[in-house]
């Protein structure tokens, strides 16, 4: 299952993704969802193309529990850092080499 098929599989439901952050190398667990959340949009356009950088944009529904000031909002997840995803009561593992979920 590639990323687009995963996005269709999940739909608007909340999923949990575990990934390694590029900036710090720490492992992060995030409850996220796809979709448009107008309340959290600041406006404007991203100054970069996330797909070209190997990133995918999701909405973090709970913020980062390790950072007290972190609020819900849009986040970029690095595809090469994904460890696992739990969605619709299924555990999926990201195959970095083939860029597919198993």
Image: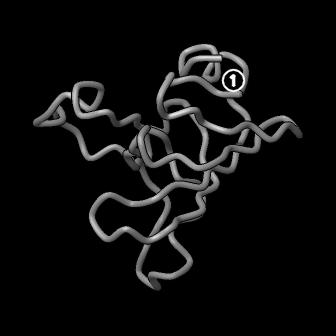
Residue 34 appears in which quarter of the rendering? Answer: top right
Compare residues 39 and 9 and report the one nearer the observer.
9
Going 65% across and 47% down the picture, which residue do you hit? Answer: 84
Label tally: 1
11, above or below 91, in the image: above
Question: Is 85 situated above or below 96?
Answer: below
| Residue 70 vertical placement versus 51 (above, below) | below
Label 1 CA crowd tier, 10 Å (few <14, some 14–19, many 20+): some
Colour scheme shown: one colour
Q: Is residue 78 above or below residue 96?
A: below
- Horizontal and vertical percent for residue 40? 40, 49
**Residue nearest the observer in this picture, 65 or 93:** 93
Horizontal side, residue 16 vs residue 25: left or right = right
Q: In what quadrant of the picture does the C terminus appear?
A: top right
Left or right: residue 30 compared with residue 12: left
In this figure, which residue is indicated by the disc labeled 1?
11
Q: Residue at x 45, y 49 (%)?
A: 81
Pinpoint residue 76: horizontal percent, then vertical percent: 37, 45
| x and y percentages locating residue 41 in the rendered image | 34, 43
Q: Residue 25 placed where, x, y %?
A: 37, 68
Q: The N terminus is located in which quarter?
A: top right
Q: Secondary structure at mark 1?
A: loop
């Amino acid at each position: 299952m590639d990323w687009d098929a995963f996005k269709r599989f999940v739909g608007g439901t909340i999923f949990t993704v575990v990934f390694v952050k590029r900036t710090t190398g720490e492992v992060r667990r995030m409850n996220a969802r796809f979709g448009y959340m107008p309340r959290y949009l600041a406006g404007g356009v991203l100054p970069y193309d996330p797909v070209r950088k190997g990133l995918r944009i999701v909405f973090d529904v709970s913020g980062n529990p390790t950072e007290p000031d972190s609020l819900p909002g849009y986040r970029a997840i690095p595809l090469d850092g994904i460890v696992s995803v739990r969605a619709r009561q299924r555990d999926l593992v990201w195959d970095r080499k083939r860029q597919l979920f198993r």
